[in-house]
């Protein structure tokens, strides 16, 4: 597993900062969020590009796929919380005083504090049931971001040796009023995410992320993703490494005007730091209307837009990935 990909496990484990939103933005970070609406949006000529852009952001821009292809996930948003959490989930023995205390209040490097509680069965290895809880209070470690709220990691499965880079690790991540402030913007997230990292068959590493419901806030907008499953596979045996993504989820967003259901009918695949050069994302909407986003190459995408729900495209639009993602930003 490449060093870069291993580092990006941090980004995957903090997917809540990105899934369901198009990046960090100004908001109050409030987490009393409504459930998804029950109505699917109807695709029209006027909203098709916007809907496709919003959906593309979930998979491509500064979210999961972007993290794996180097297209911009602000890993600093993970902050010290994810870094501490992952270091706690290492094969390195925990400090003796931590094992004795089980709980400690630490000062962050610049300002604020983090209350750390650890419940482990062994200081020498990871075991199912191990629990790592972090409560951040204006924690600034000098990374450019300030953390507030709670993050709890519970090990659900473990086999192998992470120090030897061959292991299977399952983690449940619970976010409670978790907020990241960066460049004056606040991103909030709530929900419970299951993450499985499987590197037992090198050079292949697979990360599977799932959540029944995940809610984020940004730019004053609340978005909720339900029934989410994302599977990311990196083949480190290729140069540059190839990454494929398969996903399915339902997203409720005021930027869409309702809900859409998304799935990869053909796996999205990227090489190096480019956008996907192959793959298809299907967007299902009201009245069987929908959009298929087709990767033509690492620069261009095609939208096949079905307005009347008969299964055939009524409109076809070719545009760059950058233009597609900008359409989501403009929503």
Image: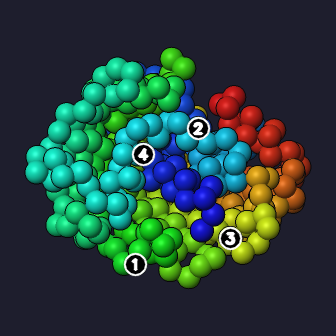
Colour scheme employed for the rendering of this structure = rainbow
Q: Residue 285, percent across and down?
A: 60, 54
Mark 4 lies on residue: 83
Q: Nearer the N terminus, badge 2 or badge 1?
A: 2
Q: How far apart are marks 4 and 3 (CA)?
A: 23 Å
Q: Nearer the N terminus, badge 3 or badge 1?
A: 1
Q: What element carries label 2?
A: loop
* Quadrant in which the N terminus is drawn: bottom right
* Quadrant in which the C terminus is drawn: top right
Mark 1 lies on residue: 160
Residue 236 disc label: 3
Q: Is residue 205 left or right of residue 14?
A: right
Residue occupying the far bottom of the picture:
201
Q: Is mark 3 on a helix, strand or loop?
A: loop
Q: Nearer the N terminus, badge 1 or badge 4?
A: 4
Q: Distance between the residues labelled 2 and 4?
A: 14 Å
- Residue mark closest to the camera, 2 vs 4: 4
Q: Residue 140, percent across and down?
A: 40, 25
Q: Residue 11, percent across and down?
A: 52, 49
* Residue 35 seen by the camera: no
- Determine which quarter of the picture holds residue 139: top left
Q: Residues within 10 Å of mark 4 (few under 14, many from 20)?
A: some
Q: Distance between the residues labelled 3 and 1?
A: 19 Å
Residue at 48 percent across and 51 percent down: it is: 10
- Determine which quarter of the picture holds residue 116: top left
Q: How far apart are marks 1 and 4 (CA)?
A: 21 Å
Residue at 62 percent across and 50 percent down: it is: 67
Q: Is mark 4 on a helix, strand or loop?
A: helix
Mark 2 lies on residue: 74
C-beta proximity under 8 Å, tags 1 and 4: no
Residue occupying the far front of the picture:
96
């Amino acid at each position: 597993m490449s060093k870069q990909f291993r580092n990006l496990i941090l980004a995957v484990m903090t997917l809540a900062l990105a899934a369901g939103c198009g990046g960090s933005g100004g908001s109050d970070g409030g987490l009393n969020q409504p459930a998804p609406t029950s109505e699917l949006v109807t695709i029209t000529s006027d909203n098709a590009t916007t809907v496709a852009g919003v959906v593309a952001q979930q998979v491509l821009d500064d979210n999961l796929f972007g993290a794996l292809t180097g297209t911009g996930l602000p890993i600093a948003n993970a902050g010290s919380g994810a870094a501490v959490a992952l270091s706690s989930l290492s094969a390195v023995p925990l400090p003796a005083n931590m094992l004795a205390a089980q709980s400690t209040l630490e000062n962050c490097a610049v300002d604020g504090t983090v209350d750390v509680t650890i419940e482990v069965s062994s200081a020498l290895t990871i075991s199912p049931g191990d629990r790592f809880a972090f409560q951040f209070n204006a924690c600034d470690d000098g990374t450019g971001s300030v953390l507030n709220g709670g993050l709890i990691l519970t090990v659900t499965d473990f086999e192998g040796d992470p120090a030897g880079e061959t292991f299977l690790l399952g983690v449940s991540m619970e976010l409670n009023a978790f907020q990241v402030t960066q460049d004056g913007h606040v991103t909030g997230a709530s929900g419970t995410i299951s993450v499985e990292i499987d590197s037992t068959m090198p050079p292949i590493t697979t990360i599977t992320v799932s959540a029944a419901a995940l809610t984020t806030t940004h730019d004053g907008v609340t978005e909720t993703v339900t029934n989410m499953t994302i599977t990311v596979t990196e083949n480190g045996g290729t140069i540059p490494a190839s990454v494929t993504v398969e996903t399915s989820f339902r997203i409720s967003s005021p930027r869409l005007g309702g809900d859409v259901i998304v799935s990869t009918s053909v796996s999205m695949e990227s090489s190096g730091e480019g956008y996907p050069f192959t793959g298809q994302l299907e967007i299902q909407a009201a009245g069987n209307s929908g959009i298929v986003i087709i990767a033509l190459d690492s620069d261009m995408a095609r939208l096949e837009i079905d307005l009347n729900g008969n299964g055939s495209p009524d409109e076809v639009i070719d545009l760059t990935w950058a233009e597609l993602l900008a359409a989501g930003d403009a929503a």
